[in-house]
Image (tube, rainbow, N blue to C red):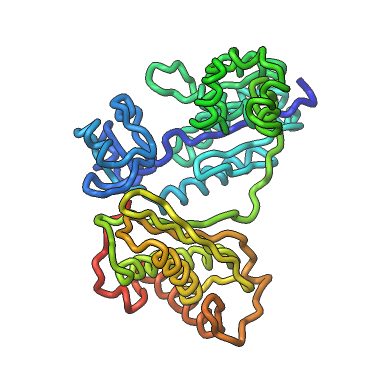
Amino acid sequence: MPGQPRLLLADCDQMFVAVARLVDPDGAGKAPLLVVGGTIESRGVVCSASYEVRAFGVRSGMSIAQAARLCPRATFVPVPRHACGKKSREVAAVLDEWAPRVEAASIDEFYLDLSGTEGVYRNAPLEATARQIRGDVLRRTGMTLSIGGGTNRLVAKLAAERAKPRPGSGGTGVLIVDPGQEGEFLATHQLAEIPGVGPRLTAKLRTFGLVSVRDALPVAQRDFERWLGPRTGAWLFDRVRGRAGAGVEPAGEAKSMSREETFARDLSTDADLEAELLRLTTRLAAELRAEGLRARCLTLRLRDFDFSTRQASRTLPEPIDTDRATFAVARELLAGLRRKRRVPARLIGVGFTRFESAEANAQLSLLDPAGSATARDRAVSAAVDRVNAKFGRDALQPARLSGSPRRRRS
């Protein structure tokens, strides 16, 4: 129908499993029972699992140990992070050739806005265009897409879920919801399937006898608002009718960048935690520089032995991108968290937000407080980047890390 929004959600089918198989064809590539997240001895969590493993009850976010108990014959491999990032960029590059506006919603999901392109594709049905896109991505990147389409993001995302070729699901890889059919399509779902309806909201809705979308359709907006509050009530009233924003934001600057590590054993001393923190911040700062960015906000995340998770953030007067400045800020945040609760830790993570272009902010600090970057810092970091680019990512690293045992990554 001319003038209607034409949105697609392209979802890389089991991306982490697929990439693990591509990078290790003789190992993971030959394992139908495959879990990606860490080795069987690690203490990480499941990032993704093949459909064959999911039949045993294994799910994303589950501990590796629990997954191993449910499916002991599975092959367990670490997340191929670098390869996944590279493959994601390859997929995005192909999609950019098909749509005037493409938005990366995550590493494996992309929204495409094809509104107004009917003439470009000779008025072909949106489903036919989606199947062409799917075939092109598979041919050029080796990645299989599940594509959902409709007049808004919500419908496109739910359609992509239904399109996935899971065993016994009947999904064919592409599902398009025609304009005017949004409400009927939504009515076939459970409330818990709607993005944004989490376990807590699902449980609360169940107390009112609402489990499926069909259960919720007769409920008046004022009742939703009375039960859930004005904002959530109005939001859910629209969602169960298939109403949602239709916009797609073209790719822009990164919004966040982070790394974390789950230890093979709990770490108790500040020295051990600082060594792991130095390893993380050094690698993350190098990635930041590679993107031509500096960050004004750094967040440190610490998960204790009992799974309680704490974090602290700092917004800086000047953006940073050097190894020394990044570690100095992260170290102070770690010290603050440890003063409040000094117990063994099982995970540490670092994240950057509030980015600025490195070229747009070239003013150098004349002082050298923690959190600032001097000209010498930047010269040292640039030299390290050149050496590691030539001889390998860890060819040159801080002396404090030389000879230290590498802990298993999840």
Task: Classify the position of the N terminus by image quarter.
Answer: top right
The x and y percentages for residue 171 are: 47, 20
The x and y percentages for residue 340 are: 42, 63
State which quadrant residue 361 falls in.
bottom right
Q: Residue at x 67, y 16 (%)?
A: 219
Task: Examine the rendering and report whether any part of residue 344 can be seen.
Answer: yes
Q: Is residue 227 left or right of residue 116?
A: left
Picture layout, residue 94 above or below residue 233: below
Q: Residue at x 31, y 72 (%)?
A: 271
State which quadrant residue 10 falls in.
top right
Q: Is residue 199 left or right of residue 4?
A: left
Compare residues 163 and 277 and report the one nearer the observer: 277
Picture layout, residue 42 above or below residue 312: above
The x and y percentages for residue 397 are: 36, 74
Task: Examine the rendering and report whether any part of residue 293 can be seen.
Answer: no
The furthest residue to the bottom = 366
Picture layout, residue 81 above or below residue 327: above
Picture layout, residue 226 above or below residue 352: above
